[in-house]
Amino acid sequence: MPIEFVSPMQDHDCSDSVGEQVLGTQPNAIFRDEAASKINNLRTQILLGKSDLIIALFGENKYRQWNTAMDANTAIALNKPLIIIPPEALHHPLKELSPKANVTVETIDQAIKVLSYIFDTNA
Amino acid sequence: MPIEFVSPMQDHDCSDSVGEQVLGTQPNAIFRDEAASKINNLRTQILLGKSDLIIALFGENKYRQWNTAMDANTAIALNKPLIIIPPEALHHPLKELSPKANVTVETIDQAIKVLSYIFDTNA
Amino acid sequence: MPIEFVSPMQDHDCSDSVGEQVLGTQPNAIFRDEAASKINNLRTQILLGKSDLIIALFGENKYRQWNTAMDANTAIALNKPLIIIPPEALHHPLKELSPKANVTVETIDQAIKVLSYIFDTNA
Amino acid sequence: MPIEFVSPMQDHDCSDSVGEQVLGTQPNAIFRDEAASKINNLRTQILLGKSDLIIALFGENKYRQWNTAMDANTAIALNKPLIIIPPEALHHPLKELSPKANVTVETIDQAIKVLSYIFDTNA
Amino acid sequence: MPIEFVSPMQDHDCSDSVGEQVLGTQPNAIFRDEAASKINNLRTQILLGKSDLIIALFGENKYRQWNTAMDANTAIALNKPLIIIPPEALHHPLKELSPKANVTVETIDQAIKVLSYIFDTNA
Amino acid sequence: MPIEFVSPMQDHDCSDSVGEQVLGTQPNAIFRDEAASKINNLRTQILLGKSDLIIALFGENKYRQWNTAMDANTAIALNKPLIIIPPEALHHPLKELSPKANVTVETIDQAIKVLSYIFDTNA
Amino acid sequence: MPIEFVSPMQDHDCSDSVGEQVLGTQPNAIFRDEAASKINNLRTQILLGKSDLIIALFGENKYRQWNTAMDANTAIALNKPLIIIPPEALHHPLKELSPKANVTVETIDQAIKVLSYIFDTNA
Amino acid sequence: MPIEFVSPMQDHDCSDSVGEQVLGTQPNAIFRDEAASKINNLRTQILLGKSDLIIALFGENKYRQWNTAMDANTAIALNKPLIIIPPEALHHPLKELSPKANVTVETIDQAIKVLSYIFDTNA
């Protein structure tokens, strides 16, 4: 399939430190975070804006995963098609997001099957 | 002509079963339909969103063809040019759609002639 | 509740004859329909454009109800909230519309309950 | 100040049960949630769409508060002005939201002061 | 009917001289026209932007009536409903505008009948 | 310069007869015109929608040139850059269009110079 | 005339100190400015968003008046009608803004005359 | 990096004289400026409209740099990502622009680092 995948910065340390890598050491954790988050937002805005389909994969980890939820929500607001892959344990807190997504699947393999179906243009 | 044609899934069985093919067997016909329709909607939204011109071909069959009518209507709402090809017997129920379309023709051949005229850029 | 309800023209004869009532007798049924449908479209566009919420009620009658389906679809395209009330027998042909609607209910009374919930702003 | 405040449904039980209150008992928790969340989404979409300014108040509770984050994000996507009030402990997970908001304050009283400043049109 | 009618400046002399009335005598006819047209455009943009329905009345006079054609065209581009009233003699040069209008009528009385039909919300 | 020029159909006979060439002989001049104009509008909408810059060339002929004026106006409504080339004799009737255009020039050569300036990206 | 005038905060001290008035003393001038400017931006966004017409008055003072230029520019980007009142000495640096404005006048009195002309709906 | 940089016309003389180069000698400085600025605006509108990211570099010179401020502001209004590079001395007059930008950096090198981070899609 002629698909190119991009994603928010996945390297957590890189994402947290990019502000200081660009602007130099910041006075404290608040400013370190502010500098980093602005650059992460810029990066995500450009890549998401160029995407034809957004896939939001939630994990069962300890993190609140607000960025995943917000990027999924931005896809909806921009009328970009959205597939979400939530773990079963997060069903209840994600119940308002789920019906706004185009498709909710349970595994990455299922999301790949949906992608294949989109590109099946000879049927 | 440098035109690529795409369409909603034309294989009726494939369209009806795609939900179960992706998500596995569903509890009943309602959920089977819901799973399938969401994936069909996702596929149509992406392909229609990338199209420069929508051609809606209605048949004289027993089906209500709501998807054809609604996809045509989406083209109008998105300001995408629309050609409709209705059978004569459906003139009255389609009378509100017809004046919203850019062009109404009677046969596929006539639609092809319209396409040729668009690409006649040397005239 | 401070709600005002408007609707497409419900008087079928009035809807079909409005073109001739405005423009005079037309040469044949095709032109009679075209004249009427343009005025009906104008009326629906203005009223739907001013609405905060669209409720699409499908019946179990013989009609194809394309206008209901298309007006519901226009609500979706304009990001206007949409409640649909389909009869059980039309579940399958409406399966692509249903997940695009905000809420699908089975009776008018249920739709009224949803309206009440929206205006419950003191909770 | 001539301000009217509306909010998402604050009564947690009411929010969770509204689907069954409208549609009757659902087969299981998943469908109970789906029915409720669609109606909550409809209600929030209408009220948020009519608002001139969104204030997102995060708490220090155990909940993931994805709805608060997503409603805040919708405000940004719709170019509606946004004030967020995050607790200090949530600074890091909200660091990508904070620079997208118009104003970040620490208390409700501070948000009220901002509202007063907006309406100070005689200065 | 609770309708308010506004229009582009109908007083031809007033329309042509408003630039000099605001800015003082201009060096020549070109600048006199430029000063006037900018103020006329501002006035029309505000009034047309607040209108729910545009009615474009063409006359059988010697003028080219480009402003009428362009204001009608702006209504179309803004998705504002449009009724045009062309004289029979102008059918051919207006043939590309006519199918873009919602409704084409022959007399002002007919346009009034269409307005009445829109406000017939009890039918 | 890597520029591709397209235009509305310039062959007047071809433009007037395209409706009958597609749909067959029409009952009278009105329907002949309606059939042709819809196809011309479709063609222009697609080509204008894909253009980065619109150049509207007015002539000193007897025609009212409403299509030129309306296509120029559509460019403005779509925020597409617009250059107009009016003959001196049409200054007064085009006075409301002129200040809405980005640039008004007097000759085709001058328009070409403007194009060259846009592509001078090394300066 | 039934006009309500609002403006960005005109009290320079109040505008510069509002951040500290809401959030308390800030560590240094940079943060004092950042806190204030975000609240000023919020206030201007709401008021400008509700305005039907923007009037940008430039002064002959020492300030760079970037906010005036940017608010004028926002009006243009939002397709809101714009009148600018530049002092003669600022003609050259404002030459790119001037042709984007709807109307450029030299005095406040002239701007008032333009307003009167807009509301002259009986002519 | 597969990046193409374009910019407003950097050659100050070329920018100021382009109107006369296209249209011939103008009567005075005002018209010379008006002719030039319209062509500069057209050029900037096309190039900025095609850009994925805008970088606004302010200098410590005597100029008011309104065009830089306004082009930055247009990027914001069009939801195009924006990096600004202000000199320290201009912090205060640019304080309302800074929080609207995605990222504020101090040097061109830092802006390049941000660009590198965007294209780091393998992380």
Image (spheres, coloured by chain):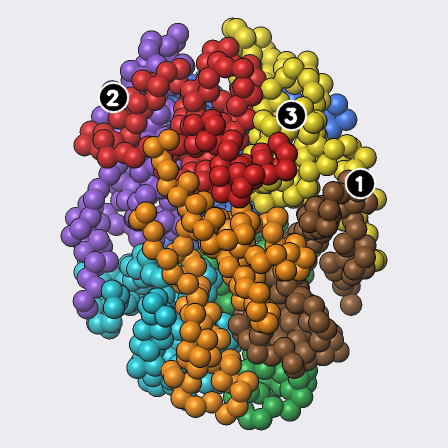
Chain colours: A purple, B cyan, C green, D blue, E brown, F orange, G yellow, H red
Q: Residue type at mark 2?
A: Cys
Please determine if labels 1 and 3 lie on a single subunit.
no
Q: Position of residue A46 (x, y in %)?
A: 34, 36
Q: Residue type at mark 3?
A: Leu
Mark 1 touching mark 3, by CB under 8 A? no
Q: Which mark is residue G90?
A: 3
Residue B2 is left or right of residue D45, and the answer is left
Q: Is residue G100 visible?
A: yes
Q: Position of residue F103 (x, y in %)?
A: 53, 46
Tell which subunit mark 1 falls on: E
**Which element is circle 3 on?**
helix
Residue at point 58%, 8% (across, down): G25
Position of the C terminus of chain E, as image quadrant, is: bottom right
Residue that carries the numbered disc 2 in the rendered image: A14
Tell which subunit mark 2 falls on: A
**Which element is circle 1 on?**
loop
Residue that carries the numbered disc 1 in the rendered image: E24
Callout 1 crowding tier (Cα within 10 Å): few <14, some 14–19, many ≥20: few
Q: What is the CA distance from the residue labelled 1 to the residue labelled 3? A: 21 Å
Residue at point 25%, 20% (across, down): A13
